[in-house]
Image: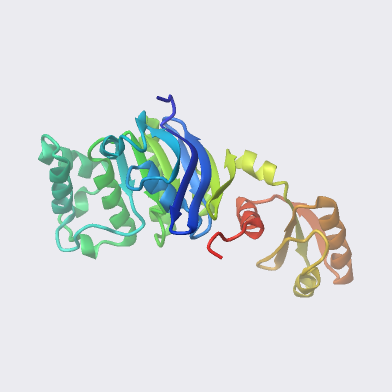
Amino acid sequence: MTADAITVRDLTKRFGEKTVVNGVSLSVRKGEIMGFLGPNGSGKTTMIRMMCGLLEPNGGEGYVLGHDIRRERRAIKRKVGYMTQRFSFYKDPTIAENLNFVAGLYGLPGARHVVRNTIEDLGLASRKDQLAGELSGGWKQRLALAACIMHKPELLMLDEPMAGVDPKARRDFWDEIHALAENGLTVLVSTHYMDEAERCHRIAYISYGNLIAKGTVPEVMQDAGLTTMVVTGKGTARAARALVGADGVDQIAHFGAKLHVAGADAAALSASVARIAQETGCTAAPADTSLEYVFIQFMHTARDNMQ
């Protein structure tokens, strides 16, 4: 038993000869929003499916909501809401009809009352008679979230829920997630969006099956040890070409008329950027490092486990 909503140790999953999740240990506190980051194919979805009882691990152990992930997978499923990457509801029925169907699958007492309350709580009342297949991406995700929380789960697992959804819909969705967390729901969400990661209480970065970093966003950024400089002037295009392969330079990115340069060796980076800025008639100054730079740095230093 554990006081955390999720505690897993040395979790491992193999498909044939390929190790997709390699000895990952992770804990998620009750009432916490944990962001799960990593490149495509890094093992995030496999981790989520093992923790919500859909896949059995090849190695390791753990508890989810006090239940053993190997021996009590059915009990875990009853207490978890799992939202997949793809829209998985019938397109021809309406929002209300889809939710009534899901309520029946759960065998919820007073299903009509539960569906009506869920529709109101998630702001779906004005569209409850609209066909699910005609909804925009944001409304489809709101329907999916409604279906996931109708049975009052203690843990919500969201697998890249906002892929392809516009910024306004994403912000509204995240407002709902924080409201649910304030009422005690634990949330584990995988995402590629840095603004979404920054909305989480803590984040964990998994790269090709290995857990690389975890902690609050400031902690992860500080531990990454990156330095960023910004180069401005008419010669930024020439500066960018000259900086490729320069000592201390790990990343180069254009932002409008400015050039952002980042690296793990602060002294070498500063020297290279100062020299090339002078040679190209530009100016250079320190800048704040963003989470996106840290994310990309982790990708640069990780090895693809499928190669």
Residue at the spot 41% in from the left edge and 59% down from the top edge = 163
**Please, which residue is most extreme toward the front here?**
17
Left or right of 135? Residue 175 is right
Residue at the spot 35% in from the left edge and 42% down from the top edge = 52
The picture quadrant where one finds residue 63 is top left
As rendered, which of 296 and 196 lies closer to the eye? 296
Residue 257 lies, with reference to residue 99, above or below; the image says below
In which quadrant is the C terminus drawn? bottom right
Q: Position of residue 79 (x, y in %)?
A: 29, 35
Residue 98 lies, with reference to residue 7, above or below; the image says below
Residue at the spot 17% in from the left edge and 53% down from the top edge = 98
Q: Position of residue 73 (x, y in %)?
A: 30, 39
Q: How many marks?
A: 0
Q: Position of residue 120 (x, y in %)?
A: 22, 42
As rendered, which of 273 and 203 lies closer to the eye? 203
Residue 131 visible in the picture:
yes
Left or right of 18? Residue 240 is right
In which quadrant is the N terminus drawn? top left
Residue 183 visible in the picture:
no
Q: Which color mode does the image show?
A: rainbow
The picture quadrant where one finds residue 72 is top left
Residue at the spot 43% in from the left edge and 46% down from the top edge = 58
As rendered, which of 106 and 217 lies closer to the eye? 106
Left or right of 175? Residue 123 is left
Q: Position of residue 155 (x, y in %)?
A: 35, 37
